[in-house]
């Protein structure tokens, strides 16, 4: 596990080993820590603009002792087979899940993404880490389907008074063609969340309609 202070110090250290300036998006537990939804995580989730920038980041963390690991045991078979899967690197009980451009088919525009926070880590080079709004964090947690993802989504909704479910549903529908299980996984997550928070029927109806249209 890595706590908030450790995470920021680690990013600062990585900046000392970079060969070029890099920009990435923080998702998952990493973004949740920056946003104050949790104070520790075992996986640092980042999305890069292209393979070149991911490779530069990988070279830096390899110098710190991180080695590539198989996705087996962390992601299920359908996610391991998806072209939008991450590369995974670990050192002890710390882990990086590194995506390029999309998370299992859900596209993220690194340059133009709506963000809530930005962190600049200055070392030999500059590492910029952008943090997405809570609605994206909920949606991406539903997509990744790992241990603790459901628990993390609950943490967000219990701490936030307002969640823009219309935005979440619209984004899922917009990108459903690049991920065949996206709508289903979001629907499943929302059904479980109904025990913790109020979600209007209209949002479920929109997902059901999108599923039916896709079958035609």
Image (cartoon, helix red, strand yellow):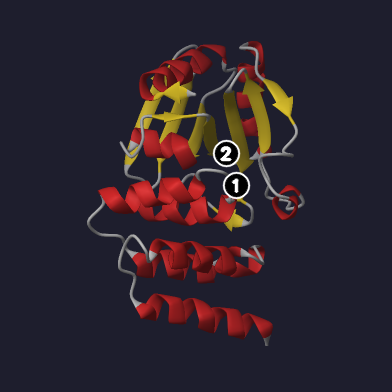
Q: Nearer the viewer, residue 176 or 148?
A: 148
Q: CA distance from mark 1 to mark 2?
A: 6 Å
Q: Position of residue 58 (x, y in %)?
A: 65, 24
Residue at the far bottom in the pictured view: 216
Residue at image point 60% right, 35% down: 97
Residue at image point 58% right, 51% down: 145
- Residue carrying label 2: 48
Q: Position of residue 169 (x, y in %)?
A: 44, 69
Q: Quadrant of residue 214?
A: bottom right
Horizontal side of residue 46 vs 72, given as left or right: left
Q: Nearer the viewer, residue 79 or 53?
A: 79
Q: Which of the image's four quarters has the C terminus? A: bottom right
Mark 1 and mark 2 lie on one chain; the one further toward the N terminus is 2
Residue 60 visible in the snapshot: yes
How many residues crowd around disc 1 within 10 Å: few (fewer than 14), some, or many (20 or more)?
A: many
- Residue carrying label 1: 101
Residue at image point 43% right, 54% down: 138
Q: Position of residue 17 (x, y in %)?
A: 56, 13
Q: Is residue 129 above or below residue 122?
A: below
- The reply to whether dot 1 and dot 2 touch (C-beta < 8 Å) is yes
What is the secondary structure assignment of the residue under circle 2? strand
Q: Is residue 47 above or below residue 9?
A: below
């Amino acid at each position: 596990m890595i706590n908030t202070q450790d995470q920021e110090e680690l990013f600062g250290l990585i900046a000392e080993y970079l060969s070029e300036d890099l920009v990435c998006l923080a998702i998952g537990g990493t973004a949740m820590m920056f946003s104050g939804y949790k104070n520790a995580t075992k996986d640092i989730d980042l999305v890069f603009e292209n393979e070149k920038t991911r490779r530069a980041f990988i070279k830096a963390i390899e110098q710190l002792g991180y080695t590539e690991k198989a996705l087996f045991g962390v992601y299920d078979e359908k996610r391991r087979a998806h072209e939008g899967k991450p590369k995974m690197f670990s050192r002890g009980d710390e882990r990086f899940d590194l995506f390029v451009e999309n998370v299992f088919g859900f596209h993220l525009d690194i340059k133009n993404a709506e963000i809530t926070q930005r962190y600049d880590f200055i070392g030999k080079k500059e590492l910029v880490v952008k943090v997405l709004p809570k609605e994206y964090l909920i949606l991406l947690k539903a997509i990744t389907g790992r241990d603790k993802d459901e628990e993390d989504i609950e943490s967000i909704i219990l701490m936030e008074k307002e969640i823009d479910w219309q935005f979440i549903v619209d984004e899922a529908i917009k990108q459903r063609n690049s991920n065949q299980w996206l709508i289903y996984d979001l629907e499943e997550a929302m059904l479980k969340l109904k025990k913790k928070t109020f979600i209007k029927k209209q949002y479920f109806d929109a997902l059901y309609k999108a599923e039916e249209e896709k079958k035609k």
